[in-house]
Image: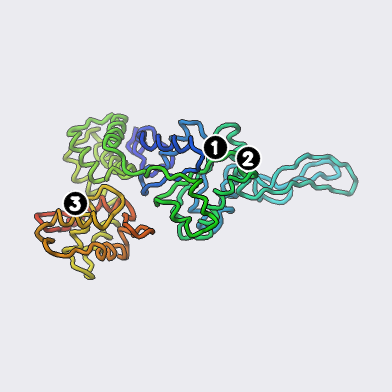
């Protein structure tokens, strides 16, 4: 077995060799599916949301159909993506049929989609020099999507999954349309299909994004926001590591030291853990051995392969001349220490004063101004929460790169050059 068969950080399909059950989140999904509300599953990029819900649906024999909101954003239409979704499932379908006077059956109308229907009943009418056509009325794309999923599911539970919710946050018409679609499932015409909706995305507080649309006001009674999918627990990270390298039959020396380092640099983000494990596995492929002495070169390779652009963005922020470099670098260092995804002003100020007591004694820090500057960089590493009460990393990899890049000596912060990262 090869390393890339065991560690697959960008695979859309669950890999049994590197998947670890996320018990807390599986329990949260179970409770959500027992309830009457639709479900919103959220968490940062790379935290394993897709593998999580696919694992849950498979284990519970729930059928699903996935609508990609990124594609809907590109096309400017949810209806178009509903149409594409069913077309991808059914491939080529015909819109109608005609019976010629010889009784031969022909298709007509092109390939406009499954929901345009099939002939209710084909009748052979043998009339010389005359042709008769029979067509059904088309269902609109959303209902056709529900109907297809229900037929596919038969009597089993079924869910329509909307992936990449973050892709439509700036598309007001699509947000409003998605809100209306959720409300429509209370209507008898659409509710008859008994389909649940699962929305998957990176931002939290889904109700905030629908708050500008009065017509969608009742959504708060129809959508449940589940526990945020974040980094793996320490135990889950260890299980992924052990299971993967046992599958590869590697001999692992200094296991605890390697795992401790793995947890810190990857922030226990599933995709990043797998990336790093893949580099470790390739490093030891020749003799099927891992050793803590490999960590330095693996760090270097991981930064170069996965985080080089991230490093450049951090370097540019540190080199900015718009404010005091010392205070800003202190702030960046404290950002790397945070475990939570939300970055709150009071927490950052407390960290700065705790880590740099001499340099902050009796001085104003103004973390709000510093975080605002960092968020307005050419490549922002943090962004303000739309509600305005906190910040968050634009990608978890920025926190990882800060941990590998910044060095604290006493109360001074310096930056490792990329060739020196250990």
Q: Position of residue 151 (x, y in %)?
A: 62, 36
Measured from the top left, where is residue 289 in percent x and y? 22, 33
**Residue at the spot of label 1:** 158
- In the depicted structure, whether residue 333 falls above or below residue 274: below
Gap between marks 1 and 2 measured at Cα: 12 Å
User: Sequence order check: which comes first, mark 2 or mark 3?
Assistant: 2
Characterize the local packing of mark 3: few (<14), some (14-19) or many (20 or more) Cα atoms within 10 angstroms: some
Question: In the image, which is nearer the foreground, mark 2 or mark 3?
Answer: 2
Residue 75 in view (yes/no): no
Answer with mark 1 or mark 3, whichever residue precedes in sequence.
1
Residue 257 is tagged as: none
Q: Nearer the viewer, mark 1 or mark 2?
A: 2
Q: Which residue is drawn at 18% across and 67% down?
A: 324
Q: Classify 260 as above or below 108.
A: above
Q: How far apart are marks 2 and 3 (CA)?
A: 59 Å
Residue at which label 2 appears: 192
* Sooner in the amino-acid sequence: mark 1 or mark 2: 1
Circle 1 residues within 10 Å: few <14, some 14–19, many ≥20 = many
Q: Which residue is drawn at 22% across and 64% down?
A: 366
Q: Mark 3 points at which residue?
A: 421
Which residue occupies the extreme right position in the image? Answer: 128
Please state if 350 lies on the left or on the right of 99 as rendered: left
55 to the left or right of 247 = right
Q: Tell me the SS state at disc 3.
A: loop
Check whether the beta carbons of the residues at disc 1 and disc 2 lie within 8 A of each other: no
């Amino acid at each position: 077995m090869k390393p890339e068969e065991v560690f697959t950080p960008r695979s859309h399909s669950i890999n049994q060799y590197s998947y670890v059950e996320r018990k807390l989140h599986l329990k949260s999904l179970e409770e959500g599916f027992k309830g009457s509300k639709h479900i919103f599953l959220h968490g940062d990029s790379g935290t394993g949301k897709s593998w999580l819900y696919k694992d849950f649906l498979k284990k519970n024999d729930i059928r699903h159909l996935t609508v990609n909101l990124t594609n809907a954003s590109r096309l400017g239409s949810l209806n178009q993506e509903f149409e594409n979704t069913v077309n991808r499932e059914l491939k080529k379908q015909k819109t109608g049929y005609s019976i010629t006077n010889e009784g031969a059956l022909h298709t007509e109308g092109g390939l406009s989609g499954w929901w345009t229907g099939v002939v209710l009943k084909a009748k052979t009418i043998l009339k010389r020099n005359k042709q008769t056509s029979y067509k059904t009325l088309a269902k609109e794309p959303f209902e056709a999507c529900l109907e297809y999923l229900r037929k596919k599911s038969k009597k089993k539970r079924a869910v329509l999954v909307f992936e990449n919710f973050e892709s439509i946050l700036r598309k007001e018409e699509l947000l409003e349309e998605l809100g209306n679609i959720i409300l429509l499932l209370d209507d008898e015409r659409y509710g008859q299909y008994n389909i649940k909706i699962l929305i998957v995305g990176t931002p939290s507080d889904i109700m905030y994004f629908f708050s500008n649309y009065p017509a969608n006001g009742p959504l708060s009674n129809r959508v449940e926001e589940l526990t945020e999918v974040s980094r793996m627990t320490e135990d889950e990270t260890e299980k992924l590591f052990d299971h993967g390298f046992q599958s590869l039959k590697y001999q692992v020396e200094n296991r605890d030291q390697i795992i401790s380092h793995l947890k810190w640099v990857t922030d226990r983000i599933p995709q990043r853990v797998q990336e790093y494990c893949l580099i470790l596995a390739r490093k030891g492929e020749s003799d099927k051995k891992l050793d803590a002495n490999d960590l330095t070169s693996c760090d270097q390779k991981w930064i170069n392969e996965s985080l080089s652009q991230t490093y450049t963005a951090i370097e540019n922020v540190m080199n900015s001349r718009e404010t005091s470099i010392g205070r800003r670098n202190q702030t960046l260092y404290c950002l790397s220490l945070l475990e939570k995804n939300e970055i709150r002003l009071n927490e950052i100020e407390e960290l700065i004063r705790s880590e740099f007591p001499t340099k902050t004694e009796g001085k104003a820090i103004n973390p709000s101004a510093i975080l605002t500057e960092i968020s307005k960089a050419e490549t922002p590493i943090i962004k303000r929460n739309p509600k305005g009460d906190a910040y968050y990393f634009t990608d978890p990899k920025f926190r990882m790169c800060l941990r590998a890049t910044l060095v604290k000596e006493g109360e001074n912060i310096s930056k490792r050059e990329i060739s020196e990262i250990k």
